[in-house]
Amino acid sequence: MKKINFFQKLFHKFLSLIFFFKSLFFKILESFIKRLLLKKNDRNFLYRLFKANESYLPSSSLQISTLILSRNRLIDDPVGAISVHGVVGLFGLLVVPVTNDGATFVGQIAGAATIFVWVFAASLVTWLVLKAIMGLRVSEDEEYSGLDIVDCGLEAYPDFSVRK
């Protein structure tokens, strides 16, 4: 089994941070260019451009910091759904009263709590039905030998195989 030393791990973390901030920069740049192309004859363009993007930087920073924190805490979230849909989604709900006079923080929090309770209950029922019908885990022997052998008949990573 190949071991990764401290400097390789540090280098990988450094590269991942560079790619996160590079993608953030290009998302902001793309947003500005789209608005430039759509509103090129508008006198209040710069004001509206700032107003439309003023919550983008905090939400992007919040998403990246949550993603880094969840990876450091070893939370199993391979696509970053918790940081994008959970944390930044809640941030988006709580920003609405700042930009809309008809919305209230209490209403937004009540809406977020309603969505959370509904999704939790529906997911719990779904998982309980799946557990009752077919189970949620494979057998211990299949887990040890690897699902690539059980499902496909060959090892996906023969260099990293574990033998009893």
Image (tube, rainbow, N blue to C red):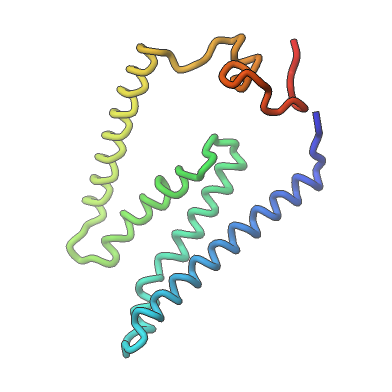
Residue 78 drawn at (x, y percent): 54, 40
| Vertical side of 155 occupied by 2: above or below | below
At a point 59% along the width and 57% down the height, the residue shown is 20
Q: Could you tell me how many numbered marks the image carries? A: 0
Residue 29 drawn at (x, y percent): 50, 72
At a point 43% along the width and 65% down the height, the residue shown is 56
Q: Nearer the viewer, residue 107 or 64?
A: 64
Residue 158 drawn at (x, y percent): 74, 25
The part of the image, by quadrant, that contains residue 15 is: bottom right
Left or right, residue 44 beside residue 59: left
The part of the image, by quadrant, that contains residue 114 is: top left
Q: Nearer the viewer, residue 102 or 153?
A: 153
| Vertical side of 71 occupied by 159: above or below | above
At a point 59% along the width and 62% down the height, the residue shown is 21
Left or right, residue 18 beside residue 114: right
Left or right, residue 76 beside residue 40: right
- As drawn, the residue found furthest toward the left would be 102
Residue 60 drawn at (x, y percent): 48, 59
| Vertical side of 59 occupied by 126: above or below | above
The part of the image, by quadrant, that contains residue 51 is: bottom left
At a point 59% along the width and 38% down the height, the residue shown is 73
The C terminus: image quadrant: top right
The N terminus: image quadrant: top right
